[in-house]
Amino acid sequence: MRTYRFKYFAEDLLELLTIIFVVSGIIIGFKVSYFFFIMAAFAVFFLITYAIIKRIRSVKERKEKIKDKWGKKQRHERSFSDIIKLFLFLKKSTDNHIYSVDDTT
């Protein structure tokens, strides 16, 4: 649990530092030299690249989870009392539409 929180803390800190570099690069670029705008541009490029890499990593992790679960029986917790309530509600409904509800809903 601790490493899980630290992982997201490190990512958030990295994004925060990048935003600070962008803002400081723009402010210093106006005050001192236009050369500091390059620092802001690199920080924006880094932030975009990091977001893309983070998204690719997330997609790979999701694919691995699906691959591991594929073909295995999944355990679903169902509350049949809620399903019965839904059937009764739909039965009392004045709507003319017909709704079909199965046990996985």
Image (cartoon, helix red, strand yellow):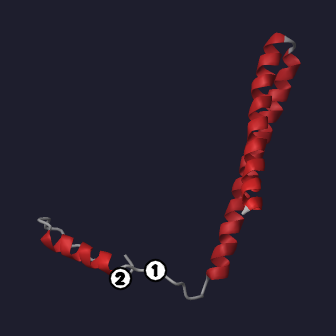
Q: Where residue 99 appears, x then y in whole percent? A: 24, 73
Query: In the image, is 105 to the left or to the right of 16?
Result: left
Question: Residue reaching furthest left?
Answer: 94
* Above or below for 83 versus 38: below
Q: Identify residue type, mark 2.
A: Asp
Q: Identify residue type, mark 1.
A: Glu
Q: Residue at x 70, y 73 (%)?
A: 64
User: Which type of secondary structure does the marked residue at label 2 adopt?
Assistant: loop
What is the quadrant of the N terminus in the image?
A: bottom right
Q: Residue at x 33, y 81 (%)?
A: 80
Taking depth in this image into account, of 50 and 9 the one nearest to the observer is 9
Q: Which residue in the structure is indicated by mark 2?
A: 103
- Please give the count of numbered marks on the rendered protein: 2
Q: Where residue 15 appears, x then y in whole percent? A: 74, 41
Q: Distance from label 2 to label 1 (Cα)?
A: 11 Å
Q: Where residue 63 appears, x then y in whole percent? A: 67, 71
Q: Earlier in the sequence, mark 2 or mark 1?
A: 1
* Above or below for 21 versus 32: below
* Above or below for 64 versus 14: below
Taking depth in this image into account, of 46 and 15 the one nearest to the observer is 15
Tell me the crowding category of disc 1: few under 14, some 14 to 19, or many 20 or more residues within 10 angstroms, Cα based.
few
User: Which type of secondary structure does the marked residue at label 1 adopt?
Assistant: loop
What is the quadrant of the C terminus in the image?
A: bottom left
Query: In the image, is 71 to the left or to the right of 20?
Result: left
Query: In the image, is 27 to the left or to the right of 36?
Result: left
CB under 8 Å between discs 2 and 1: no
Q: Where residue 81 appears, x then y in whole percent? A: 30, 79
Q: Which residue in the structure is indicated by mark 1?
A: 77
Quadrant position of residue 87: bottom left
